[in-house]
Image (cartoon, rainbow, N blue to C red):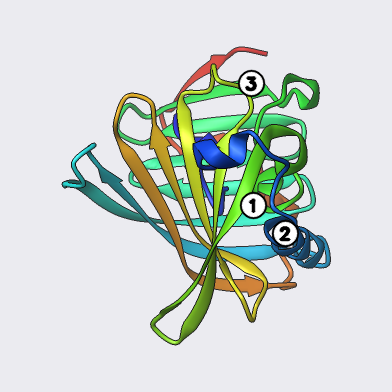
């Protein structure tokens, strides 16, 4: 998935904060999210995905789903499906009826959906707490993050955390090229049984699919 590093639930900092250590309050919130996520045996979530240009004009809005279990995950949205069984990744493009197969390289620094919910932020970002606000019936805490690696294709990430549930509610990513991507969690179920077969691409269910094996 081309924008996978922008998902879920995600997951930058003012120039003032760059000269200082990360905010202890922000770290405590992120640590709480990480600790809560690690207690889940599985996660099923629905999300919306909005793309805006630099001036804030909406370019597209889509919805999708994500399943996670251990190191396995499956992401589906807008004619694309990504399967990962913990060692292999299948990226399926419905329009082309084509699947690209690659190895999951844990040493490459690749950001998986699971990493976006755990303590990836400790080494990769500086962060501050911007405060909290009401979104519908939820109270969310917003954390502004800046990647330490300036070669990243994005320069800021705004993470909103559901204060009561201690889960990520939304993630907004500002790309260097100007576009903005916002992922908002609409539904979430945890600790429900998920069969391992859901995380492996089954060629038999996709007649005529072309395989591109990069392993």
Mark closer to the chain start, 3 or 2: 3
Which residue is identified by label 2?
195
Mark closer to the chain start, 3 or 1: 3
Q: Residues within 10 Å of mark 2 (few under 14, many from 20)?
A: few
Residue shown at the point (64%, 52%) measured from the top left:
198
Left or right of 172 in this view: 69? right
Q: Name the secondary structure under disc 3.
A: strand
Left or right of 154 in this view: 90? right
Report how far apart the C-alphas of labels 3 and 1 lie in the structure: 17 Å
Tag 1 near tag 2, CB within 8 Å: yes
Towards the viewer: 192 or 211: 192
Report how far apart the C-alphas of labels 3 and 2 lie in the structure: 22 Å
Q: Nearer the viewer, mark 3 or mark 1?
A: 3
Which residue is identified by label 1?
198
Residue shown at the point (49%, 82%) measured from the top left:
138
Left or right of 193 in this view: 111? left
Considering only vertical position in the picture, is 207 above or below 134? above
Q: Name the secondary structure under disc 1.
A: helix
Q: Residues within 10 Å of mark 1 (few under 14, many from 20)?
A: some
Which residue is identified by label 3?
102
Q: Position of residue 209 (x, y in %)?
A: 43, 27
Report which quarter residue 151 is drawn in.
top right
Q: Which disc number belongs to residue 152?
A: none
């Amino acid at each position: 998935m081309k924008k996978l590093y922008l998902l879920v639930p995600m997951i930058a900092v003012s120039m003032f904060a760059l000269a200082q250590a990360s905010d202890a309050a922000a770290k405590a919130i992120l640590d709480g999210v990480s600790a809560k996520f690690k207690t889940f045996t599985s996660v099923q979530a629905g999300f919306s995905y909005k793309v805006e240009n630099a001036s804030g004009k909406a370019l597209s809005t889509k919805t999708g789903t994500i399943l996670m279990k251990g190191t396995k995950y499956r992401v589906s949205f807008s004619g694309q499906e990504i399967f990962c069984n913990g060692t292999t990744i299948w990226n399926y493009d419905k329009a082309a009826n084509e699947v690209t197969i690659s190895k999951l390289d844990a040493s490459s620094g690749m950001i998986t959906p699971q990493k976006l919910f755990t303590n990836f932020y400790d080494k990769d970002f500086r962060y501050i707490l911007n405060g909290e606000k009401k979104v519908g019936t939820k109270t969310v805490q917003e954390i502004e993050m800046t990647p330490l690696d300036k070669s990243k294709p994005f320069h800021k990430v705004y993470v909103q955390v559901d204060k009561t549930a201690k889960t990520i509610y939304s993630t907004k990513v500002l790309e260097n090229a100007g576009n903005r991507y916002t992922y908002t969690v609409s539904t979430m179920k945890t600790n429900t049984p998920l069969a391992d077969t859901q995380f492996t691409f089954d060629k038999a269910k996709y007649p005529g699919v072309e395989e591109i094996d990069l392993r």
